[in-house]
Image (cartoon, coloured by chain):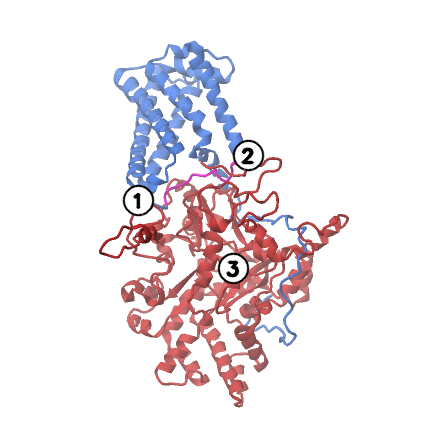
Chain colours: A red, B blue
Amino acid sequence: MKLMAQLAMVMNLDKCIGCHTCSVTCKQAWTNRGGMEYAWFNNVETRPGQGYPRQYQDQDRWKGGWTLNKRGRLTLRSGSRFKRLLNIFANPDLPTVDDYYQPWTYDYENLLSAPAMDTIPTARPKSLITGEDTAVTWGANWDDDLGGGPAQIGRDPLLARVSRQVKLEFQQTFMFYLPRICEHCLNPSCAASCPSGAIYKRSEDGIVLVDQDRCRGWRQCVTGCPYKKIYFNHRTGKAEKCTFCYPRVEVGIPTVCSETCVGRLRYLGVLLYDADAVLAAASTPHEHDLYPAQLGVFLNPHDPRVVAEAERAGVPGDWIEAAAVSPVYRLIVDYQVALPLHPEYRTMPMVWYVPPLSPMVDALTQTGHDGEAAGNLFGAIESMRIPVEYLAELFTAGDVAPVRAALRRLAAMRTHMRAVNLGEPTQPAVAASVGLSTREIEAMYRLLAIAKYEERYVIPSAAVSQAHRLDALATGCSLNGDGGPGMTAFDAVAEKFHLTDTNGAGPNGKNGRINLLNWDGRNIDGLFPARAGTNEGGGRAE
Amino acid sequence: MTTWLWLIVPYVAFTSFVVGHIWRYRHDQFGWTTRSSQLYESRLLRLGSPLFHFGLLAVLGGHVLGIAVPASWTDAVGISESGYHLISVSMGTLSGLVCVAGLVILLYRRITVTAVRQATTRVDKLMYVLLVAAIGTGMLNTVGVNLLQGDYNYRATVSPWFRGLFTLSPEPGLMAKAPTSFQVHALVVLALLALWPYTRLVHVFSAPLGYLTRPYVVYRSRGDHLAARPYARAWEPPPPARPAPIVRMGRGPR
């Protein structure tokens, strides 16, 4: 047993309205730089749809994730280590920028500077990579809301696995949004395919990061990640990925995508797991068993033996405390309404999803039935084969049983809470039929529907957890420096993001720093803190 | 002149090569990358890049055999001068042609694909000129001099001169006797070596052989940089009206 702690996320898809606020704020915070124009650490895709990059789930083509070899041992789907090294000069399974999309901007300057003429001047689209005129033919969410019709949506790799004849009907009745970030997997195949060892999983919080100094630009990680959530910065020649906003969560505040989520559908919390059990769980022979196998890796934070083991393993006290009230643990393990994204990739993903019930409700309502009644909803979950099968392809490697169970729990919650709200007599039998007590259903409702900020984001900060180290510092006066009484968590983030000097008002020693938000992506002077003893920046333009 | 060209210039180039690499490794880890352009264009790269790199590795192996290994060693294992000549010319021509074919494809790609062309820096261009010159003069020596014109026993002049630079008993006079094409090749390669640490060519020294033996997943500690940041936590414990955890379906935590 090797107990480790991990920050995980759950997204409640029923509440996603597809507004892309998470994507835009993430982009503004992290990828509005040269070389990353095409990259979205957070993207929202419409399902069914091709996704971003196009058809990334077609692993026969992109070779992401893990597979079991003939001897039943876990190996990278793209081949052995030796094969990876032989392919290092030209990665055969690498998506090009066209598979994402050609990033573009518009020539707005022309609108103002064009000479007087008979026709209205236009702002032509220009490629952000070459600067030349470009034809806009695809984007990160081109098939949003089933845009493009059956011709585009029909290329969804998951649809191919669901029965063909109902495709059209399917499109008329069923659509939902899927926000995606890096999964921060327990068994990350990106890290496993990095020849340089630059990608690592942080032992304290499980966040998967790319060491920008160690990355050598071999591009194998882009292939290795089955979710295609590692992006190659074509200007710096380094791989970049979602950081789980570690500078924010380290000081106890949620990721940008969670913080700005309009639908409040994201949950952040701690999960304790047994790192020694991960390999065996990921090697489970049958794909349908991978979801239960991953559940089996998580440890019960209420079990005194687990708490004792966590203390022995050096997990800080407030992390153990946070694990006990983790909303993520409740949704994943207690209620089992959250499911992993593509467990068949065998990466043990740690961003889970509550599958959407609303398509069923909508379909029922459209056909004139009462979409909130338990009998109708349960019947729909049983009979509406295609949406359930599609969800199962996403979340449980095609096994419809866990998806049905999760949807039934959500349906029972709807029915029960409607009765409560309308003052009708509740039916404990409905709750019992999904294995929950009415009290549990109400607690689940509270968490899914009206939970406040502090309940949705239970993030122990890294700093507090090391408070005992402060004893050594107690002799000095700490009021003036970092962590002084006036220093808030947000100030710390502002400093990390180099937001201190947008108007030249920064303190001495920091006024040469560049503000990442206005960075032109080319000049790197002031981007890195000055080396000790010198005034020059750390980087060097090539 | 002989001393300048075949004694001072080589040592200046080697110094730049070694000191430049140390300096860059210590000060520019972030810039140490292949700066691959495969994201822009994959089809031509997949053809040209393996041809070029594997060809170049074979060429490098040939140079080790021809320059670093003294003629007396190959004599000792029973390889005659004519036998060595046959091997070196045939293998050298073959690997050189593979390398040149790859280089031509890659250069064509770099010039015709707009995005790749625009990603080419000035240092890249200088490096390409030297690389093409080095490979071109090398092919001239292997094919033009040794294959078509007949035999030139560079192991009597060029090789001992080169080894002498490393054993600190340099004999610049040896190189002065070599044919002009060999002299030009040597000078071009020295210039390339001098420029090497300041270009993308540094990626040669990050050949990731350690990948074959390291564990798949790397864990790393966050370190102690946060130790002095005693912020209050941003969350409050939720209200007490939470039910006891439930475990069912035989799938719960252990």
Are marks 2 and 3 in one subunit?
Answer: no
The location of residue A446, given as percent across then percent down, is: 56, 76
Q: Is label 2 or label 1 in front? A: 2
What amino acid is at disc 1?
A: Arg
Give the residue at mark 1. Answer: B43
Q: Which residues are magenta?
A: B25-38
Helix, strand or loop for the magenta stretch, by majority: loop
Give the chain of mark 2. Answer: B
Q: Nearer the viewer, residue A2 or A101?
A: A101
Q: Amino acid at mark 3?
A: Val
Rendered-image quadrant of the C terminus of chain A: top left
For this view, does A418 lie left or right of residue B234? Answer: left
Question: Does dot 1 land on a helix, a strand or a loop?
Answer: helix
Chain letter of disc 3 in the image: A
The answer to which image quadrant residue A123 occupies is: bottom left
- Secondary structure of the residue carrying numbered label 3: helix
- Provide the residue designation for mark 3: A256
Circle 1 residues within 10 Å: few <14, some 14–19, many ≥20: few
Q: Point out which mark residue B26 bears.
A: 2
Give above or below for B158 relative to A397: above
Q: Position of residue A278 (x, y in %)?
A: 54, 57
Q: Taking B56 as reference, is A464 above or below it?
A: below
